[in-house]
Image (cartoon, rainbow, N blue to C red):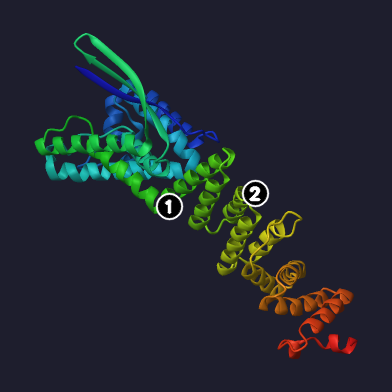
């Protein structure tokens, strides 16, 4: 019986050419070519020996391989996962992770060898698989939802079977890590190493996971997944669902105003057939922006969505909140528009009295004296005993 699993495609579109991955592959190929002049001497000199070898071997051993098959298999996995990961984290971080992960892989291999198989302390360790394991560990976090396509082959007696399947990265790479850990535990328990540095693979993978987690790569992946879902729902004619996704993005990434603006746009699209409901949703979003201290964004949002001819009617509280914000920021256009909305649409409310009073002052501050006096006369006539009178600008009384 024979069974083989081989990943052959990572479903992640690459935006930029992976220069660091390509350079590492090129260095490995050159080193293997040089190694052919005297393979044994180079392995002894550049290979890593757990008992003791020069500090440089912690890095040179990553570029030495035992055979063409060993080299090509490692470079295959390096390209498969490295190109997509480098596209996500950048070439400098990728190269650093490669070297750091390879060193961590050798460190765990050394610890386990000292602990359970000291007779193997002088066996040189070569190959880049530990460093590649760190790339795979980081990939499992940074691109955890990325689909990996796997080819399988099964041979029982003389009846071969083959096919393909697809799994998310965290599942496929999680199973691979579990296999390496199981192999390491079995060989450590028996004390007979197989010639494969299973614990180096474990150490490299764990190093990649830790680096990815501490670097916040999981959060970045969550953001990208949410953004893709929101875009898909929006383009698929489901703006209401898209609006909720964008709102979640705004909560996860509050420093980026793009998500809040897209949430507003999707919400307005979703409620286009019901202006009252659209106004309530827009009002809630404006109040949230004001509460979060996003004053400039609140004013811009009002200008964009609440001042046009097809703008939905905002609730009283939202109008007075944005008007007060704009009034204090000398944003006369927004303040005047919001106060006028309250005066015109809600004349029987307590807010209408304050709005009319402040509207006269907004016109006066913006230099429109004629309009200011007109509003002031209407206010004086409608509210002759208003408690706001003592706070009126003297210009109104002089004009009278």
Q: Where 150 falls versus 238 (above or below)? A: above
SS type, badge 1: loop
- The 10 Å Cα crowd at callout 2, few under 14, some 14 to 19, many 20 or more, is few
Q: Position of residue 104 (x, y in %)?
A: 30, 45
Q: Nearer the viewer, residue 182 or 17?
A: 182
- Which residue, as the protein is rendered here, is positioned at the far left? 190
- Counting every numbered tag in the picture gives 2
The tag on residue 216 is 1
**Residue at 53%, 59% in the rendered image:** 254
Q: Nearer the viewer, residue 165 or 324?
A: 324
Q: Nearer the viewer, mark 2 or mark 1?
A: 2
**Residue at 14%, 35% in the rendered image:** 186
Is the residue under label 1 in contact with that under label 2 (CB below 8 Å)? no
Q: Is residue 399 visible?
A: yes
Quarter of the image for the C terminus: give it.
bottom right
- The 10 Å Cα crowd at callout 1, few under 14, some 14 to 19, many 20 or more, is few
SS type, badge 2: loop
Q: Where 259 falls versus 192 (above or below)? A: below
Q: For this view, does 295 lie left or right of residue 332?
A: left
Q: Nearer the viewer, residue 264 or 342?
A: 342
Q: Is residue 54 visible?
A: no
Q: Position of residue 102 (x, y in %)?
A: 33, 41
Q: For this view, does 360 lie left or right of residue 349?
A: right
Q: Nearer the viewer, residue 366 or 254?
A: 366
Q: Earlier in the sequence, mark 2 or mark 1?
A: 1
Q: CA distance from mark 2 to mark 1?
A: 41 Å
> Label 2, on which residue?
273
Q: Position of residue 342 (x, y in %)?
A: 71, 70
Q: Position of residue 298 (x, y in %)?
A: 64, 63
Quarter of the image for the N terminus: give it.
top left
């Amino acid at each position: 019986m024979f069974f083989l699993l081989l990943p052959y495609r990572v479903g992640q579109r690459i935006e930029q050419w992976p220069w660091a991955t390509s350079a590492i592959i090129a260095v490995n190929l050159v080193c293997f070519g040089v190694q052919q002049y005297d393979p044994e001497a180079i392995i002894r000199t550049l290979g890593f020996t757990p008992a003791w070898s020069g500090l440089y071997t912690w890095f040179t051993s990553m570029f030495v391989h035992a055979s063409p098959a060993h080299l090509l298999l490692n470079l295959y996995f390096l390209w498969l996962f490295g190109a997509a990961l480098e596209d996500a984290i950048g070439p400098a971080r990728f190269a650093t992770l490669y070297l750091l992960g390879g060193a961590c892989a050798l460190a765990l291999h050394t610890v386990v060898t000292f602990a359970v198989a000291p007779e193997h302390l002088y066996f040189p360790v070569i190959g880049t698989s530990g460093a590649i394991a760190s790339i795979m560990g980081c990939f499992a976090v940074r691109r955890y939802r990325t689909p990996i396509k796997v080819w399988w082959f099964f041979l029982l007696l003389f009846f071969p079977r083959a096919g393909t399947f697809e799994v998310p990265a965290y599942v496929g790479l999680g199973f691979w890590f579990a296999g390496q850990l199981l192999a390491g535990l079995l060989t450590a328990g028996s004390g007979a190493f197989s010639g494969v540095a299973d614990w180096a693979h474990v150490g490299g993978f764990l190093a990649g996971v830790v680096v990815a987690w501490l670097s916040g790569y999981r959060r970045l992946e969550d953001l990208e997944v949410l953004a893709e879902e929101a875009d898909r729902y929006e383009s698929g004619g489901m703006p209401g669902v898209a609006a909720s996704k964008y709102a979640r993005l705004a909560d996860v990434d509050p420093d980026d105003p793009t998500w809040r603006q897209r949430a507003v746009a999707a919400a307005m699209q979703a409620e286009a057939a019901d202006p009252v409901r659209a106004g309530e949703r827009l009002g809630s979003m404006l109040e949230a922006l004001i509460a979060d201290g996003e004053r400039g964004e609140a004013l811009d949002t009002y200008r964009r969505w609440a001042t046009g001819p097809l703008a939905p009617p905002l609730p009283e509280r939202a109008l007075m909140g944005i008007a007060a914000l704009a009034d204090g920021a000398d944003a006369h256009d927004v303040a005047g528009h919001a106060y006028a909305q309250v005066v015109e649409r809600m004349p029987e409310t307590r807010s209408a009295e304050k709005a009319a009073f402040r509207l006269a002052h907004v016109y006066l501050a913006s230099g429109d004296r004629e309009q200011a006096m007109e509003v002031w006369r209407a206010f004086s006539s409608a509210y002759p005993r208003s408690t706001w009178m003592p706070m009126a600008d003297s210009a109104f009384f002089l004009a009278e």
